[in-house]
Image (cartoon, rainbow, N blue to C red):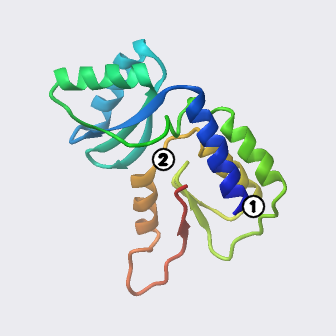
Amino acid sequence: MKVVKARGEAMQAAAEATPSGMVAVLAIDVPDVEALVIEARSAGVLEIANYLCPGNTVISGSAAAIEEACKLAEAKQYRVAKLAVAGAFHTNLMKPADERLAEALAGVEINAPRIPVWSNVDAKPHSDPAEIRALLVKQVLSPVLWEATIRGLMEAGAASSTRSAPAVCWRV
């Protein structure tokens, strides 16, 4: 719990350092969302933060870039919804929260899990404690690959009623 607290405090501090936010872009394919992000970056930092499921992608960035993205989306008749969050999570605006998390994790022993841990950073299972530690840190700045993670779990048999689930999934 100390690590979770340290991560939360570090991310809150990063959020307070730069006015920022997140917006869900709905019913639009990822390539169109990527194009919107590139176009709106003229106003500031903007990145895709969450690949949730088909037609639900979240972008995250500076307040000015978020406003520009919403304006552009409206002109293109895209549906967007601003999220009630403190900051631009899963972007480089969360620096140095990743470094503070790495410091907090350095003092914690991570044992090899009995079952693989699925990371939403790369949508793959991991058993090596050093890899898990590194991915937890990387996750602060990286997009959440939620859809790919769930698809990977399903392909690995997690949805099967005849087999036990081979993995645990984290989303922090």
Residue at which label 2 appears? 144
Look at the image and tell me whether residue 30 can be seen.
Answer: yes
Could you say where residue 24 lies in the image, as x and y percent from the top left?
32, 40
Residue placed at 48% from the left, 47% from the top? 144
Quick one: SS at disc 2? loop
Q: Residues within 10 Å of mark 2 (few under 14, many from 20)?
A: many
Quarter of the image for residue 46 reads top left
The residue positioned farthest toward the left in the image shown: 77
Number of on-image labels: 2
Q: Residues within 10 Å of mark 1 (few under 14, many from 20)?
A: some
The outermost residue toward the top is: 42
- Which residue appears at 33% of the width and 19% of the height? 68
* Three-letter code, disc 1: Pro
Mark nearer the N terminus (1 vs 2): 1
The residue sitting at 75% across, 46% down in the picture is 102
Query: Is residue 119 toward the left or the right of residue 30 in the image?
Result: right
The vertical placement of 15 against 50, above or below, is above
Note whether 69 is above or below 97 in the view shown.
above
Q: Quadrant of residue 99?
A: top right
Q: Position of residue 123 (x, y in %)?
A: 51, 54
Q: Nearer the viewer, mark 1 or mark 2?
A: 2
Q: Nearer the viewer, residue 140 or 4?
A: 4
Residue 47 visible in the picture: no
Quadrant containing the C terminus in the rendered view:
bottom right
Q: Which residue is farthest front?
A: 16
- C-alpha distance separating marks 1 and 2: 20 Å
Q: Which residue is mark 1?
A: 129
User: Position of 56 compared to 136: left or right?
Assistant: left
Amino acid of disc 2: Val
Quarter of the rendering occupied by the N terminus = bottom right
- Indicate the position of residue 134 as horizontal and vertical percent values: 71, 49
Say which residue appears at 15% left-offset and 28% top-offset: 77
